[in-house]
Image (cartoon, helix red, strand yellow):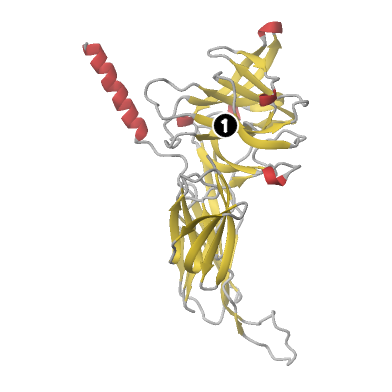
Amino acid sequence: MKKVFITLFTVTMVWNSVSAQNPIYDSARVYDIVTDTDLFYLFANPKPCFNPCPYSWAPVSRMVQEYVVTDTVTVYGVAVPLRNKTSNPIRDSISFYRALLMRKTGYMGTQGYSFQYVDSVTLNRSHPRFCWFYYEDPCDKERNLTAPCYEFYFDTPQQINRMMDTFYVGRYYQVPYVGYPDYSLQEYGGEYDPSLPSTIYRSPIDMEIFYYCEGYQDKRWGVAFPIIGFRCGPIQQLFLDAYTGDSAVVRWRQVEEGTLYNVRLTGEDGSDTAFVISDTTYTFTPLSDSVRYTAMVRKQCHYATSNYDTTVYGEWKTVSFGTTIIDTTIADTTGVDTVGIARPEVEGFSLVPNPTNGAVLLTTEAEMTGVEVYTAAGVPFLHLPASGRTVRFDTSTWPAGTYLLTVSTSQGIITRRLTVIR
């Protein structure tokens, strides 16, 4: 009886510890949207026409996808589009989901293929990162889908993970019966023509023998992606909060935890200053009220394991303010220099996160008076009372799909699309 008590106590402590760990995705932050034009993932080529949707796989613990390269590549990790079907967020303490990097070593006839492990890493050891992956069907853009995506980074890619010819990436997924009662992970992929060959292999529990999957449900593009570079996308929203002539306040959205920001201010008078901060708001002062300024902000992304320590940078996002010394937007027929006050070049609307499966923050530069929500077919769905410049609402009970938001402001009406996923 004493042993049973100790076991139950230990399980309770383990679950409480797991629950206290941080979710990898935070709805208050803005994350990169990855597409198949980016260079830090490896993509199967050519890309077929496909229908992006959840991937319903057979109950086996190991699944890998084949990739072929003509030059040697370093595989830093594996990106897997997935979500938890329950309300429990995917946390950085999970140890039952593991990224795999493998080679095929032989054919064993009816027994399948022998595979060799090159590397693997569990979610709680992988320096995990979140992003969105945009599945774009090359043949029908109405079927495009943005899915949540989790990145696993191996500990030792520069030592052993230089791959050539044919290799495989995927995952091991075996939820324990005790300690993780609220996890049911859903993976994604692009389902293509059943007449085309599959690139998926699966293995039963605790075996290094994999079987080629030829079923129509396994004809999938993009179930798992090799990470071959480091991601650092641009800041998606940059706002000019205030400008008084001698000072300006610029702000932007929070991105991944721990990210630093490069901030730079240039003026038409030749001034140029730059610095690094961790906050998402900065006040420029003192300024000259007779100078046109441009503020620039970009992300500084840090990647580090036991074998590398790398910093990469996103693209600059800009906003301008102040007085233009020579107004080039107006034709000058007098031969005399003119001076004009330039309008702030700001983005006046943000809707984050989008896509979403929970809370959404809507922000406008102008005062809001109301928000109407319509289905993609134009049917009224919901009225959201709104005032001021921000409103937060919850989509957790909305059916999955695309919605149209019509936002009434003091400066006019804005219409945007919002995608709700499950």
Quadrant housing residue 271: bottom right
Relative to residue 228, is residue 295 drawn left or right? left
According to the picture, the residue beneath numbered tag 1 turns out to be 187
Picture residue at 43% right of the left edge, 37% below the top: 87
- The image position of residue 94, as x and y in percent, is 44, 29
Disc 1 is placed on an element classified as strand
Picture residue at 53% right of the left edge, 63% below the top: 407
Which residue is more in the foreground, 14 or 147?
147
Picture residue at 43% right of the left edge, 66% below the top: 387
Relative to residue 66, is residue 405 drawn left or right? left
- The image position of residue 342, as x and y in percent, is 60, 78
The local crowd at label 1, few if under 14, some if 14 to 19, many if 20 or more residues have their Cα within 10 Å, is: many
Q: Residue furthest front?
A: 379
How many discs appear? Answer: 1
Q: Amino acid at mark 1?
A: Glu
Picture residue at 50% right of the left edge, 32% below the top: 126
- The image position of residue 402, as x and y in percent, is 59, 49
Which residue is more in the foreground, 250 or 25?
25
From where the camera sits, is residue 160 visible? no
From where the camera sits, is residue 7 visible? yes
Which residue is more in the foreground, 349 or 25?
349
- The image position of residue 373, as x and y in percent, is 53, 56
**The N terminus, quarter of image:** top left
